[in-house]
Amino acid sequence: MSLILKKSDRELVSIWEEKIKEIFVGSIPTHSSWIGIPRIASTLRALAGTSAIHVFLPGSSGQDLGWVGTDGDIGAIEFVPEIIRGGQRPRTRVYVVNPLKLEFFVPNNNILEAHFVLTTDSIKPTGLDALQSAGAAEEVLNLGGGEYVERFYYDRGRLPDGSTIPDQARIEIRYLRPARFTIFSKASAYNRLHVPDINAYSGIHEDVDAFAALVERLSIVQRHWEE
């Protein structure tokens, strides 16, 4: 098994290496961890702001890590795939998680296969019938002030009482149960290889042992630059 990297991948590799060096001033450890929302958010913000890095979500999907923020009301971290500049906050759709720990791993000293694992705890559900991702999350419309309604009201453009959707309202995908998220470079074998027995979008990263075995296997995959 081998992986061909194209000339266009050089920018992806460069961005990933620069992000890692920004987080770790000096030598890069083979393992590191962060606990507490301020430290976790700070590290994730250093990774964000590019379309070159991908987050694999619980279940079977993923998103780019475009922007990271915090929600002080419920003690959570928020992220969106879109790149948001100038201190603005996302207004339409945001992922919300309750972080426990962020870890960094470099398997077999392969920086291109280095990755982050975000372990999260539960979030109190809103009580609305809005579960998705096999019950891992709920998708709701946050009106602000702790008030939530079903997400379909956003599509209708009106609230249950017929009033218009307030400007500050936004769709939230709130992860209710403990879960694991992984973050990889888009130039990694983990992100690139999709063969019958390797599919990063299968949610394998939630199985700690299976994920570790897969990453170990991919870290020794031969890589070649396209001529």
Image: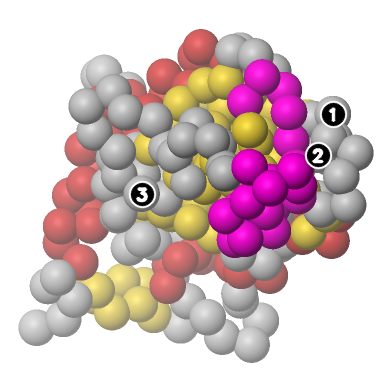
Q: Residue at x 78, y 59 (%)?
A: 132
- Residue 124's label in the rendered image is 1
Q: Is 117 in front, or is 143? A: 143
Query: Gap in Å between the C-alphas at discs 3 and 2?
Result: 23 Å
Task: Name the residue furthest bottom.
Answer: 196
Q: Is residue 206 left or right of residue 55?
A: right
Kindly state the secondary structure of the residue where label 3 is placed.
loop
Q: Badge 3 local density, few (<14 within 10 Å), some, or many (20+)?
A: some
Instruction: Determine which quarter of the picture holds residue 117.
Output: top right
Visible residue check, residue 88: yes
- Residue 82's label in the rendered image is 3
Query: Gap in Å between the C-alphas at discs 1 and 2?
Result: 6 Å
Q: Is residue 186 left or right of residue 104?
A: left
- Amino acid found under the numbered disc labelled 1: Lys
- Amino acid found under the numbered disc labelled 2: Leu
Q: Which residues are magenta?
A: 144-163
Q: Residue at x 47, y 76 (%)?
A: 193
Q: Is residue 66 left or right of residue 162?
A: left
Q: Is residue 150 magenta?
A: yes
Q: Is residue 205 above or below residue 92?
A: below
Task: Tell me whether the residue at label 1 lies in contact with that at label 2, contact meaning CB atoms closer than 8 angstroms.
Answer: yes
Q: Position of residue 152 (x, y in %)?
A: 69, 58
Kindly state the secondary structure of the residue where label 2 is placed.
loop
Quadrant of the frame with the C terminus: bottom left
- Residue 176's label in the rendered image is 2
Visible residue check, residue 112: no
- Amino acid found under the numbered disc labelled 3: Glu
Kindly state the secondary structure of the residue where label 1 is placed.
loop
